[in-house]
Image: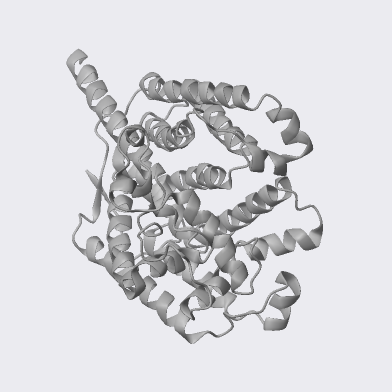
Amino acid sequence: MSVKISTKKVIFFSPAGLATLSYALFFFSTLIPPSTYEAIMGERNVMFLDLPSHLLVAACVAAFLLGARWIGERTLPSLAKTSTCLRPSLVALPLLAFVVLNLVSILLLLKNNPSLLVTWLTDAHSVKVSLDTTGGLSNALPALYACCWWALWRLMEYEHATDTKAWFLRILVALSIFLAAFTALIKVARYDLLPTVVGCVFVVLIHKFKRGQITLWGNIYAGARLAVFAIAIFLTMAWLRGSEQVSALAQNALGYSAASFNRLAALVDGQINFPYAGTGIYAFRFLSYIPFLDRWISLGGMLGLPRKEDAWLSEFVAVSEAGLDGSYIWVSAFGYVYSDLGFLAIVYFFAMGLMAQWTWNSMLKGNTFGLVAYPYVAFSILFWMGDNFIAYSKVFVFMFLIGVLSTFEFASRLMVKGKA
């Protein structure tokens, strides 16, 4: 038996819905009156009704939607009901393994930074600046929160199928999510905290959608709650980094959203010149560093890519030389891809649309691939206003986790079937 899902229904957490939200943020950002923007940010407003950046973003988003539509037309429109739900005890095993791995990572981090927790409570900004993560198993964190996404779905899947409450697994999943968020907080790492929390919200909402529990108003309400939640996380991280005054928080809120599009307009206009533009470091950043493998073989070096740290530091100089506030360097995902590929960025976003819809379809079917991949893909689309997150090297961590969990599920189902 299968549950029919309308492919014409656009919900905000689908690829098309998220892309539309991101485009709306760009569009309305370019309507901010120059006087208002300049009063808050202390820099000139380049993006106000800027035609070249409008054409670029519109073309990229249209290409993304076309790619998503292309895949959507050629996949099964129905959701197969899962024949066998994993028992809570089996779901708990890999989750516990990654919890232990993350605890080891925290212990190594505390060993490198003995006064970390005390410093975090008194001056979190200095923690971010001086944090020593050498040999700290940094990739244990994205592995943990991606495993949380998988476990959370399997938990809801089991409870829905059996109509029972798996309290042990509920508590374990909640504690695991808390541990992941706590680890990101002590590192003052918004790039990990946001995917942890936002990804879990997506998992819950998409599971409800699959069960037909998301109404039109529920969809709007959930989207509004997620937006407020994401803004609250951003402001919390800004406060931890040292922004305490209301004016500073307002500048941070604008600096990590609309200001990215201001830099995009300056980039397209030729006012911002990244020294490493055209090298591939922005569109294919994941090739510059491959976890584990990079200890023996530097693929980035073989391909002639600069170090990601060098590219990152050069952005502060490039933005400052353009006469903009060098404290905020994001040029949006559109800007980063454009700086490497020019107008071939349109093709890049078409390919991203294909990939996003593929992972979305996989998640709706309850496949391990989609459960691990789509929450991060969705996060990267929602935060196009920032960096090109989809190109981060942690995608290799997710690929590794997909292999581990898929193998574990296959073996577990065989074991259960053999005992039946």
Quarter occupied by the C terminus: top left
Q: Using the image as rendered, state which of residue 68 and residue 400 is in the foreground.
A: 400
Instruction: Place residue 214 in its image quadrant.
Output: bottom left
Regarding residue 329, the answer to whether it shows in the image is no
> Where in the figure is residue 19, as x and y percent of width and height?
42, 65
Can residue 155 be seen here? yes
Up-down: is 268 above or below 84? below
Occupied quadrant, residue 124: top right
What residue sits 34% from the left and 34% below the top? 401
Task: Please state the horizontal and vertical placement of residue 84, each as a whole percent of the image.
Answer: 26, 29
Give the number of callouts.
0
Q: Is residue 52 left or right of residue 251?
A: left
In the image, taking residue 276 as reference, residue 43 lies left or right, namely right
Q: Quadrant of residue 296?
A: top left
Image quarter hosting the N terminus: top left
- From the viewer's perspective, tell me whether residue 298 is left or right of residue 42: left
- Closest to the observer: 146 or 201? 146
**Residue ranking furthest to the right:** 245
Q: Nearer the viewer, residue 395 or 182?
A: 395
x, y (%) of residue 332?
49, 65
